[in-house]
Image (cartoon, helix red, strand yellow):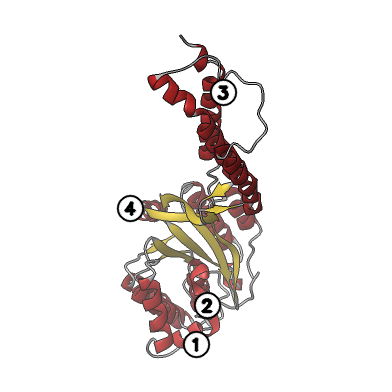
Amino acid sequence: MVFANPWLLLLLIPLGFLCIFWRERKFVGYSSLFHVGETHGFKRFVVRLFKPMFFVSIFFLIVAIARPQTRYYTEETALKGREISLSIDTSFSMTGTAIETIKRIVGDFIKKRPNDLIGITIFGTDAALIVMPTMETQLLEKSLERIQASQAGYQTSIGEGLFTSLMTLFEKEMGKKFTIKELRNSINKEHLADYAISFVKEMEKRDVLKNKLIILFTDGIYNIGISPGRSLRLMKRMGIKAYVVAVKASDVTGVDPEVAAQHIMELQKAVESTGGKYFHAENFEEVAKFYDEIDKIEKDKIVIETVSKKRDLLVYPTLAGLFLLIVSVFIENFWVRIP
């Protein structure tokens, strides 16, 4: 226990002197009914409790105005849900109906999940964070409206988009121990480097890998940046599923059709290796299956906010002080009159 106003406890010093003066009878008397009549037995015992109760009540009241509090403790605001990062392709190949189809599906997806934390990232030549995972549906919808094709460059870097989405899910856990640049470099190799492995182990130790997933909205054709397979390899190691909702690309992709087909096949295989699935946005039944698939994912506790606070304890000494004061007044003024 601590005190918000500890200096007020100095009032206990003069209270202590008053107690000493009372015991040694070194004080000025006052008009009272205390000595009216002679009391005996239990009644006399109660009468003698008057002054000890009075001083104890003052003690409690002084403690109360010093404002006793608990030490700092943490309080969590949590609910059952999922933490989802939506990665939206805004490259030049998404111009026209492709981006509008994606925005419609994403908008419906957001409305169906009031208890999930949802974040949005976009990617083209580069990747960018639009909204950190949040439950503010209105903010997500307004941000989605402003997304346009070629907003992050004309080319398509699916690997960068996936990696950026992954980092949004662990932004709070990165701290000073890990940096995005080093982690990105450590996955851009034939195998996960030691830095990436240590990051995964640290996240496992903190038990923060549950209940997270990434959903990629794209045409599946990439032509720049790190390979999507390398970002997905890290996600697989972390136990995070990835899902793809694919739309038909425009005629201008900058990639040979055979290479594009190969990229789509590789992306689908890498996504399925994480435990996720690949859906086609043009097929209404496929989109319905996509919604159902996400609904099947088990919900877990999501900590919305962690606050450090103290709890005031002044009500307890206040009630004790007032109770004893009332009892002492009763003894002084009414108990002695009882026959």
Does the image show residue 181? yes
Look at the image and tell me whether residue 245 can be seen. Answer: no
Question: How dense is the environment of label 3, judged by Cα within 10 Å: few (below 14), some, or many (20 and up)?
Answer: some
Tell me if mark 2 has few (under 14), some (14-19) or many (20+) residues whose alpha carbon lies within 10 angstroms of its own.
many
Residue 296: give its label: 4
Q: Nearer the viewer, mark 1 or mark 4?
A: 1
Q: Earlier in the sequence, mark 3 or mark 4?
A: 4
Residue type of the residue flagged with mark 1: Asn
Q: Residue at x 37, y 51 (%)?
A: 295
Q: Label 4: state its secondary structure.
A: helix
Describe the element under mark 2 as helix, strand or loop.
Answer: helix
How far, Cα to Cα, is label 2 from label 1?
A: 12 Å
Which is more N-terminal, label 4 or label 1?
1
The residue that mark 2 highlights is: 160
**Residue at coordinates 51% horizontally, 51% vertically from top-left?**
70
Q: Which residue is mark 3?
A: 329
Q: Position of residue 325 (x, y in %)?
A: 56, 29
Where is residue 305 drawn, in percent x and y?
52, 55
Residue 182 versus residue 273 in the image, above or below: below
Residue 182 against residue 243 in the figure, above or below: below
As measured in the structure, the alpha-carbon distance from the residue carrying label 3 to the one carrying label 4 is: 67 Å
Given residues 205 and 214, the one toward you in this image is: 205
Q: Indicate the secondary structure of the residue bearing disc 3.
A: helix
- Tell me the crowding category of disc 4: few under 14, some 14 to 19, or many 20 or more residues within 10 angstroms, Cα based: few
Counting from the top left corner in percent of width and height, residue 330 is at: 53, 20
Residue 185's disc number: 1
Which comes sooner in the sequence, label 2 or label 1? 2
Identify the amino acid type marked 2.
Glu
